[in-house]
Image (tube, helix red, strand yellow):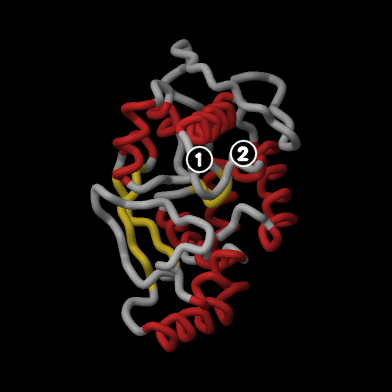
């Protein structure tokens, strides 16, 4: 593990792959990180419980159908898990043709747009953290179809599975969130994910979580 953690501010991730990276990382087996995940997720669920119930009611009243959006994602060491979100679209996609959400996407409902802008649609993932599928901080998980596509295009892509996926990550706090417009955009995101794993420390997790809390309600990439 690198002694000096990368700064959370203004990280410029390398694009090139480094095949010398270890296949095991302390981030995956750290009990202090897991303890922080459990305590943080449990506290967040209790804190936001009234809001969770209100959002669930509004989603149901606006468009009917399921309140929770479920989709298969790839987790630590390639294990498949089901991620939870509040449903923000009129369709639920979990197929080989999943499309990234785009700005002014016609699939997004009016209330869903507000949830996405404030990142409140992600709140159910605290239950994923409690279950152990995810961590508070780590590489953001992608749809299986995107894992397949980008895994064939980017040699270092699978290295991100050395850690549990997270609610937020180094890529997200450095502007690499949201719609992927070209292959370079995903390369940069994957480079940041792998940089996080290589340089992981509890201090880095706390710094990323703190910066996320400061920008989460005004992130221009949230839509």
Query: Residue 25 location, x and y as percent?
Result: 49, 26
Q: Which residue occupies 68% across, 63% down?
A: 217
Q: Which residue occupies 27% across, 50% down?
A: 97
* 208 and 60: which is toward the camera: 60
Q: Residue 170 bears which disc, if any?
A: 2
**Disc 1 vs disc 2: Cβ atoms closer than 8 Å?**
no
Residue 200 appears in which quarter of the rendering?
top right
Compared to 184, does 58 lie above or below?
A: below
The residue that mark 1 highlights is 139
Q: Separation of disc 1 and disc 2 at Cα?
A: 8 Å
Which element type, helix, strand or loop, lies under badge 1? loop
Query: Residue 93 location, x and y as percent?
Result: 30, 59
State left or right for residue 72 relative to residue 117.
Answer: left
Query: Residue 83 location, x and y as percent?
Result: 38, 57
Which element type, helix, strand or loop, lies under badge 2? loop
State left or right for residue 165 relative to residue 143.
Answer: right
């Amino acid at each position: 593990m690198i002694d000096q953690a990368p700064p959370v501010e203004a990280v410029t991730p390398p694009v090139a792959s480094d095949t010398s990276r270890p296949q095991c990382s302390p981030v995956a087996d750290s009990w202090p990180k897991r303890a922080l995940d459990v305590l943080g997720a449990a506290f967040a669920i209790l804190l936001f419980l009234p809001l969770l119930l209100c959002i669930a009611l509004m989603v149901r009243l606006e468009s009917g159908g399921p309140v929770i959006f479920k989709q298969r994602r790839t987790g630590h060491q390639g294990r498949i898990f089901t991620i939870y979100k509040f449903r923000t679209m009129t369709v639920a996609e979990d197929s080989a043709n999943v499309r990234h959400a785009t700005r002014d996407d016609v699939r997004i409902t009016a209330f869903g747009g507000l949830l996405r802008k404030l990142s409140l649609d992600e709140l159910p993932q605290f239950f994923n953290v409690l279950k152990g599928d995810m961590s508070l901080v780590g590489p953001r998980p992608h749809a299986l179809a995107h894992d397949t596509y980008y895994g064939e295009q980017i040699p270092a892509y699978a290295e991100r599975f050395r850690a549990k996926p997270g609610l937020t990550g180094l890529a997200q706090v450095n502007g690499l969130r949201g719609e992927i417009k070209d292959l370079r955009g995903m390369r940069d995101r994957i480079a940041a994910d792998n940089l996080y794993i290589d340089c992981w420390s509890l201090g880095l997790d706390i710094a990323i979580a703190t910066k996320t809390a400061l920008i989460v309600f005004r992130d221009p990439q949230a839509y």
